Amino acid sequence: MRSLACLLLALGIASAAAEGPAFNADRARINYMLNCQGCHLPDGGGVGDIPQMKNFVGNFLKVPGGRAFLVQVPGSANAALDDAALAELLNWMLLEISAAQLPEDFEPYTAAEVGQYRAAPLSDVNAVRLPLIQKIALLSGN
């Protein structure tokens, strides 16, 4: 699975390079530390009502609406990062903490895509998240 993550990271680097500055895993990790790990912990675990992302968050990219959801949740949509930095962080996060759950045809986020999704942030996260979780459960047969 590590080789898949490396391949996907390389794809992310190529995608980011086509759009702007090269993908920088160290910068993405630092942005995760500054913007995400206070609630999602260093390894992607959750705290209290904050959902665990570790070994799960990649599943959102398997269902319609899940890709947008990851950008539109308040922590992403309101992060003090520009669209390129948020795309880089999301790509790093997915590859680092949930590579095994990513769809085989995973395409890294782009800055333009992130900007489009951020324009419509969620006001009721749970109302959107629950149906997505149900769709994910159906895919896995649970």
Image: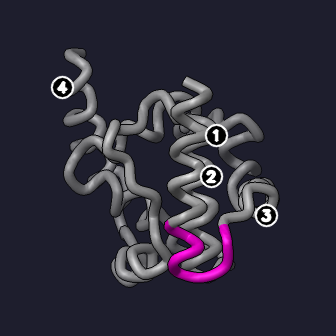
| Residue pictured at 67% horizontal, 71% vertical | 22
Residue type marked 2 = Trp
Q: SS of the residue at dot 1? A: helix
Q: How far separated are the C-alphas under marks 4 and 3?
A: 36 Å
In-image side of 67 versus 110 (left or right): left
The crowding category of the residue bearing disc 1, from other C-alpha atoms within 10 Å (few below 14, some 14 to 19, many at least 20), is many
Residue sitting nearer the eye, 98 or 65: 98
Residue type marked 1 = Glu
Q: SS of the residue at dot 4? A: helix
Circles 2 and 1: CB distance less than 8 Å? yes
Residue type marked 4 = Leu
Mark before the other along the chain sequence, 3 or 2: 3
On the image, numbered disc 3 is attached to which residue? 27
Q: SS of the residue at dot 2? A: helix
- Asked where in the image residue 13 lies, by quadrant, the reply is bottom right
Mark before the other along the chain sequence, 4 or 2: 2
On the image, numbered disc 2 is attached to which residue? 92
On the image, numbered disc 4 is attached to which residue? 138
Magenta part of the protein: which range?
15-22
Residue sitting nearer the eye, 70 or 113: 113
| Residue pictured at 81% horizontal, 57% vertical | 26
